[in-house]
Amino acid sequence: MFHSPFSRLARRALLLGAASLVAPVASFAQQDWPQQPVTLIMGFPAGSGVDVVARVIQEPLSKQLGKPVIIDYKSGAAGNIASEYVAHARPDGYTLSFGTAATHGSNAALYKKLPFDVEADFIPVAPVLDVSNVLTINPDVINVRTLKEFVELVKANPGKYNYASTGNGAGTHMAFAEFNSRLGLSMVHVPYKGGPEAITSVVRGETCCIMNQVQTVLPHYKAGKVRLLGVTTAAAVPAVKEVPTIASSGLPGTKGFDSSIWFGIFAPKGTDPQIVDKLNAAVKAVLETPEIRERFESQGNTVRIESPAQFKKTVHDNRVKWAEVAKAANISID
C-alpha cells in the first residue's frame, strides 16, 4: 500500500500530540501518589529483629499513606537478594527496600561483586530507628559476669569459643568483628540464617554468645536464660539501664566504641523527589506518634528522624565506617 509523505508527517504529528498529552498525566500521577498498595521488600526472615520493626510501623504507615503497606520477604545473602530486587525495580514509589546499616553499609565492604551500588542505585527515603546490640552470653557455656572477665577468659583460650550472628555481614557479625579486632580476641564466627536461629543457638548452648539487638534478647534475658555484659551504643539503653556500655568498661580498645545500627527505607534511583518527600513525611509522622516512640524505646531502640538529605549523609558515613572496620578485621565474604 502506498503512503504519501504527507500521511507519514500527519501520523508523526498525531503521535507527538498524544505524547504531549501523556506528560501532564504522568506528572499528576506522581502528585497523586500513592494510588495502589506500597510494598516493602524485606531481606530478612519473618520474626527477625528487622522484621519486628517493620511490622510495628506497617499499619500506621498504611494509615498515613491511605493505601495498604505490604511486606514481601526476599531473604538471603545478608539482605542482598532483596536489595538487588529493589535496585532494579520500577522507580514509581510502589516498591521500596526496608534496609539496614548492613544492607546499605557493611555489605558494600564485604561483598566485592554486588550487582548494584548501595548508594548510587538507591535513594535514602527515611531512617526509622537506631538499634543497640548487646553482648549476650549463655553463662552455662562461658560463665563470666563482667566484660573484663569475658575478655580475659577468651584471650586465655584463643579459638575455643564460638559466637553467633544473624548472617555473614549482618550487623550482629560486624559488631562482634569490630569488638574482637579492637581487643585482639580470637573467636570462631558461626553465622545463622536470621535472628531467631541465632539467639536460639545461644540459649541452647550451641554457641557461647552473640551481639544481638536488645529487642531480640530481652525476653530471654527477663526469663533468666542469658546474661548481658555490655551494650554497643555510646550511651546506656533505658530498657536495660543496668547494663553498662562497652565504651565505659575502660578496657584497652573500647574507648569510643559505638557499634549501633540503623534501619530505614530506600527507593530505587530515579524515584520522583515528590514521592520521596511524601514518604519521608509519612514515616516522620508515624515515628512522632507517642505510642510508637514509647513502644520502640521500651524495646531498647531509639527513633531516628532525618530528612532524605540527612539520611543520605548517614548512609554514606556508615558505608565509610564499615569499610574501615572490614579492612582492620580482614573480613570479606567473597
Image (tube, rainbow, N blue to C red):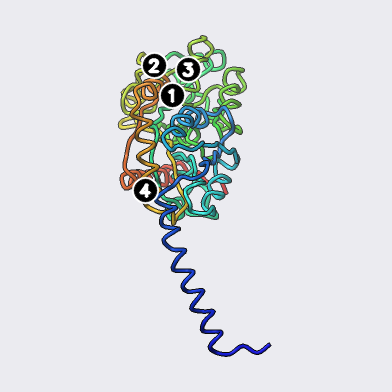
Q: Earlier in the sequence, mark 1 or mark 2?
A: 1
Judging by the rendered image, the residue that carries numbered circle 4 is: 316
Q: For marks 1 and 4, give the CA distance.
A: 25 Å
Q: Earlier in the sequence, mark 4 or mark 3?
A: 3
Judging by the rendered image, the residue that carries numbered circle 3 is: 218
> Which percent across, then down, holds residue 276?
39, 47
How many neighbours does mark 3 have within 10 angstroms: few (below 14), some (14-19), or many (20 or more)? Answer: many
Q: Amino acid at mark 4?
A: His
Residue shown at 43%/27% (left/top)? Answer: 133
Q: Earlier in the sequence, mark 2 or mark 4?
A: 2
How many neighbours does mark 2 have within 10 angstroms: few (below 14), some (14-19), or many (20 or more)? Answer: some
194 with respect to 256 (left or right): right
Q: Nearer the viewer, residue 110 or 91?
A: 91
- Compared to residue 84, the image places residue 146 above or below, namely above
Residue shown at 32%/39% (left/top)? Answer: 306
Q: Amino acid at mark 3?
A: Leu
> Which percent across, then down, holds residue 17?
46, 72
Judging from the image, what secondary structure is the residue with disc 1 in? strand
Residue shown at 41%/57% (left/top)? Answer: 27
Judging by the rendered image, the residue that carries numbered circle 1 is: 134
Mark number for residue 240?
Answer: 2
Q: For marks 1 and 3, give the CA distance.
A: 10 Å
Q: Nearer the viewer, residue 177 or 217?
A: 217
* Labels 3 & 2 near each other (Cβ < 8 A): yes
Q: Nearer the viewer, residue 27 or 241?
A: 27
Q: Amino acid at mark 1?
A: Val
How many neighbours does mark 4 have within 10 angstroms: few (below 14), some (14-19), or many (20 or more)? Answer: some
